[in-house]
Amino acid sequence: MRPIACVTGASGFIGRHLVGELIDAGYCVRVLSRKAPDSYPDEVSFFRGDLSGCEDILIKFVDQADVLFNCAGEIQNIDKIKQVNVDGTRRLIDVARGRVRRWVQLSSIGVYGQPRYGLVDEFYTLNPSNPYEHSKAVADQLLLQAAEGNAFELAILRPSNVYGIGMRSAYLDNLRRMVRNRLFFFIGPPGASATFVHVIDVARALLLCADNPKAAGRIYNLSGNDTFEHLIDCVARAECVSVPGYRLPYAAMKFIASSLGRIPGFPLTPTRLHSMTTRVYYDSSRIVLELGYSPMMDLARGIVQISMNSKVIKSYVE
């Protein structure tokens, strides 16, 4: 008899890839969504609803499940972040208690806040800095408390910047455009970090958290730890342009970003400056050592795929 996996947020970027991995791994998959999927194979059962919907549907969705993947989440709509990420998780905990063997939570490295330097492991102090990060931190704590009360087994995955074909990333799109148009320049001394992880590797890591007995009760960071110079080199090669060499001082750019970065359309915002100059790396050694995780997609290959896909779409539109 095939194991049963339930997936919330299955229509999202990560959820779609996870469903494919689960089918390949032999699971019977249940998905919870407000919209019926365009097409799913016979291994997938569709439940219409969301985390705030009918309790009877939620009970049928999770009942006797081997694993529940909570990939539902609100990132942008400030009015719905708490409703979905915190209240929705709390409601799902109440329904899943005693009905689900293991809960795998898709969290975020955002729960650690926005550190600028150092190595962040799973014991790093939580310091969320915006409503989304705070909501993910609260949801994690709710789940840890429920698991301590024997509601279910729990594994939490905290990926860094997830990317891949099909994900709308204003950050990567702007970066590619700047490099392609030869407008990009580095800021500050070399060695800034680029912490991207491909969606395929996130989906595979989630599956490891479900299948491996060692994952019960554990929290795992997941991140690619490349330098910003390597990221730009990958982008330049994928866009078939020369690698940028310009570098401007951090202090001057910080003054400009703080003075002008809040003007609509100005390219250098404080947030973008932070992402281009931070030197924090996220330690993924625990998931490697305990669960045998190994990434399938390196940054160079992932960026090439995105670039090629964009060119195909542009050619088709034209």
Image (tube, rainbow, N blue to C red):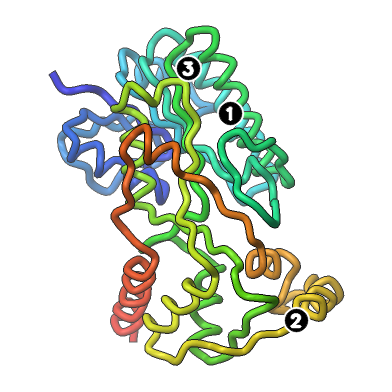
What number is the disc on residue 104? none
Q: Nearer the viewer, residue 174 or 79?
A: 174
* Residue that mark 3 sits on: 55
Q: CA distance from mark 3 to mark 2?
A: 56 Å
- In the depicted structure, whether residue 146 falls above or below residue 165: above
Element carrying mark 2: loop
Q: Position of residue 146 (x, y in %)?
A: 55, 14
Comparing marks 1 and 2, which lies closer to the viewer? Answer: 2
Q: Which quarter of the picture shows residue 257?
A: bottom right
* Residue that mark 1 sits on: 140
Residue 267 shown left or right of residue 139 in the figure = right
Element carrying mark 3: helix
> Badge 2 local density, few (<14 within 10 Å), some, or many (20+)?
few
- Sequence-wise first label, 1 or 2: 1
Q: Amino acid at mark 2?
A: Pro
Q: Which quadrant, please, contains the N terminus? A: top left
- The residue at the point 16 percent across, 23 percent down is 2
Q: Nearer the viewer, residue 187 or 289?
A: 289
Element carrying mark 1: helix
* Residue that mark 2 sits on: 249
- The residue at the point 60 percent across, 49 percent down is 119
Q: Amino acid at mark 3?
A: Glu
Q: Amino acid at mark 1?
A: Asp
Q: CA distance from mark 1 to mark 2?
A: 39 Å
- Sequence-wise first label, 3 or 2: 3
- The residue at the point 36 percent across, 41 percent down is 205
Q: Position of residue 108 (x, y in %)?
A: 55, 43
> Badge 3 local density, few (<14 within 10 Å), some, or many (20+)?
some
- The residue at the point 50 percent across, 73 percent down is 173
- In the depicted structure, whether residue 25 falls above or below residue 256: above
